[in-house]
Image (tube, grey):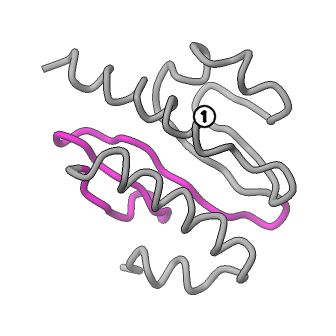
Amino acid sequence: MVSVDEYLAGTSAPNREALERIRRVIKQSLPDAIEQMSYGIPGFKYQGKYLCGYAAFKNHLSFFPASNAIAELHDELAGYKLSKGTIQFTLDNQIPEPLLVKLLAVRRSEIESKK
């Protein structure tokens, strides 16, 4: 199985930089989250539950918050291609750090409320 570092090393430098930024924000926002590979992409677990994932694709990057965060923050996510569990973005239109923090906070709250 490929590690997170190996996955990131296998992406282009611009994509790697964008994904490393997401990784850093997650680690800073939730230092207790556990980094892992899941379904072939990097992600994190928090309190034993899937927190989020992120990945690079040919024509875009994606952040997978696995929660109602997309619906809850829908207005703030205008300008991104959205589906129920995915936010697609480009290098020219990355998710701002404060918005990533909000998305993570929604997911964290969901996980903690299900204890």
| Element carrying mark 1 | helix
Q: Is residue 39 above or below residue 16?
A: above
Q: What residue do we see at 54% from left, 68% from top?
A: 20
Q: Quadrant of the N terminus?
A: bottom left
Q: What residue do we see at 79% from left, 57% from top?
A: 60
Residue 84 relative to residue 106: left or right? right
Given residues 102 and 53, the one toward you in this image is: 102
Residue 96 relative to residue 27: left or right? right
Residue 8, magenta (yes or no): no
> How many other residues sit within 10 Å of disc 1, few (<14), some (14-19) or many (≥20)?
few
Residue 49: which quarter of the image?
top left
Q: How many marks?
A: 1
Tell me where the magenta segment starts and ends, as one range: 33-59
The secondary structure that most of the magenta stretch takes on is strand
Q: Quadrant of the C terminus?
A: top left
Q: What residue do we see at 55% from left, 55% from top?
A: 54
Where is mark 1, residue-wise?
99
Position in image of residue 9 (x %, y %): 56, 86
Q: What residue do we see at 32% from left, 20% from top?
A: 110
Residue 37 relative to residue 19: left or right? left
Q: Is residue 108 above or below residue 1?
A: above
Position in image of residue 46 (x %, y %): 24, 43
Residue 82 relative to residue 68: left or right? right
Position in image of residue 42 (x %, y %): 45, 62
Given residues 86 and 97, the one toward you in this image is: 97
Residue 52: which quarter of the image?
top left
The amino acid type found where label 1 is placed reads Leu
